[in-house]
Image (cartoon, rainbow, N blue to C red):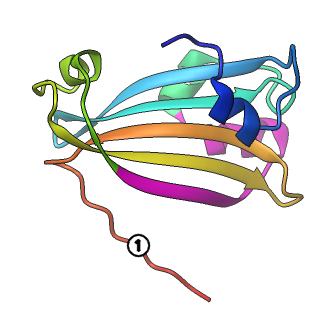
Amino acid sequence: STDEPDAAARRALALGDGDATWVVRRLRYGDGEPLLLETFWVPREVCPELDADELAEQSLYTVMRSRYGIEPHSAETSLEPAALNAADARHLTARPGTPAILVVRTTRDGSGRAIEFARDLYRGDRARFDLTLRA
């Protein structure tokens, strides 16, 4: 895939033609093994500068808070079954077709502005989600 946001990302972030984004791709580990391929887009209007070294040391949300005074407030999240394609399987040291869990998230600030769109692909045989919902 390319670094340009696809139609779903553009829609979620309410991007107009020519609106620039940052894209970050990371391979995350759990217990020393590849667990998750993380891809997220952030409008440059939200964070004019993002530094790879900074993101290696801190979470995106920590950078948003400390550098830009942006407080992530809510996130619409969906989880769905998926199967790893060849490229994703290679990164996650699995076979193509291995079950996976795709988590798609749009994060908003307190005013409702979309500040991040993410697609996280977890190995289905290593992931567990514990959720607590409050009314």
Compared with 84, 79 (above or below) is below
Q: Amino acid at mark 1?
A: Leu
- Residue located farthest toward the bottom when viewing the structure as drawn: 135
Residue 66 percent across, percent down from the top left: 74, 42
Q: Residue at x 10, y 25 (%)?
A: 95
In-image side of 72 versus 79 (left or right): right
Q: Quadrant of residue 8?
A: top right
Q: Residue at x 63, y 39 (%)?
A: 117
Q: Nearer the viewer, residue 59 or 108?
A: 108
Q: Residue at x 74, y 46 (%)?
A: 65
Q: Is residue 61 visible?
A: yes
In-image side of 12 versus 96 (left or right): right
Residue 121 percent across, percent down from the top left: 36, 38
Binning the other alpha carbons within 10 Å of mark 1 as few (below 14), some (14 to 19) or many (20 upward) gives few
In-image side of 35 versus 49 (left or right): left
Q: Is residue 50 visible?
A: no
Q: Nearer the viewer, residue 9 or 26?
A: 9
- Position of the C terminus, as image quadrant, is bottom right
* Numbered circles on residues, count: 1
Q: Quadrant of residue 19?
A: top right
Q: Which residues are magenta?
A: 58-80
Which residue is label 1 attached to? 131
Query: Label 1's element?
Result: loop
Q: Is residue 61 on the magenta stretch? A: yes
Compared with 79, 39 (above or below) is above
Residue 71 percent across, percent down from the top left: 77, 54
Q: Is residue 81 on the magenta stretch? A: no
In-image side of 59 versus 26 (left or right): right
Q: Quadrant of residue 50?
A: top right
- Residue located farthest toward the left when viewing the structure as drawn: 95
Q: Nearer the viewer, residue 71 or 67?
A: 71
Q: Residue at x 15, y 24 (%)?
A: 96
